[in-house]
Image: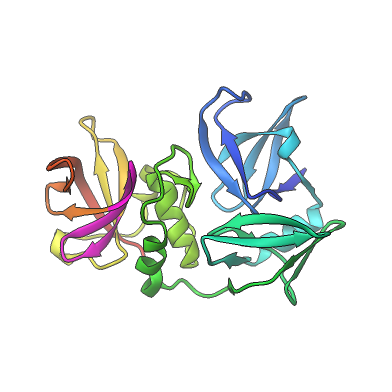
Amino acid sequence: MYGICLLSQIPCRSDASDKSEMVTQLLFGEVYSVVELTEKWAKIRTQADHYECWICIKQHCTLSEKEFKEISAAPSALSNELVQVLEENKIFIPIVLGSALPLLKNNEMKIGDRCFSFDGAALQNNAPDKSKILEYAFMYLNSPYLWGGRSPFGIDCSGFTQMVYKLSHFQLPRDAYQQAELGTACSFVEEAQAGDLAFFDNEAGKIVHVGIVIGQGEIIHASGQVRIDTLDHQGIFNKDLNQYTHRLRIIKNLL
């Protein structure tokens, strides 16, 4: 069984319970396979990053195998504004930055027996492009931190880097420690280029934070909110707190 998110966003939880923590979100147009079903919950595996989590069955929308394969075969166009609007039978559906617009043709999407119209600009399928990473990153500036979030209205550190790279047509894994396994390491902070990812560890040596290098000794990352701070060989220096908040482990060039 397969499914697609046809809401602006769907909370994905670690267990089959409304009280369970949200570990990620589905955004409009993202597809998944169903691993397990209960009366009220569906355990899913996201198609893009193979993340397993639970969603409420009321928010599940079944997708045919044919449509799932068709959508999965090629990247979808992406929403490129903080908020855009789809219309279905004169009903408006808001979608957020980075949402997928699968099977978009002549400003229409036909999914099953539903038809959505889209009156706006969208990012079309392209090769990975590092040149606009910072432009997309700055679009999330001041978004509040939200554990498991992936939208401008609430986002966590690895959700932020994943979404910015998604907009740049490069798929990252969901969690910071997984992202840290990709790319080529920089020997020194000074070698880092704008758009590289900087990773930070805790006292146990586990990668627990990630941000995007701006250059000239600065980084943009989600910590309380998406913000710009100072980056050096020690880590992140928070200008407001006047102290180091994250210890640098490694910087990776992914593109």
User: Which quadrant is home to the C terminus?
Assistant: bottom left
Residue 29 in view here: no
Name the residue nearer the viewer: 136 or 51: 136
Q: Which residues are magenta?
A: 212-227
Q: Is residue 221 magenta?
A: yes
From what the image shows, is residue 165 above or below residue 200? Answer: below
Residue 243 drawn at (x, y percent): 12, 41
Q: Is residue 196 magenta?
A: no
Which residue: 12% across, 52% down?
233
Count of marks, rendered view: 0
Residue 121 drawn at (x, y percent): 60, 74
Residue 2 drawn at (x, y percent): 75, 46
To which quarter of the image does residue 137 belong? bottom left
Residue 186 drawn at (x, y percent): 21, 60
Residue 205 in view here: yes
For the stretch drawn in magenta, what is the main secondary structure?
Answer: strand
From what the image shows, is residue 138 above or below residue 128? Answer: above
Which residue: 69% across, 44% down?
33
Name the residue nearer the viewer: 193 or 255: 193
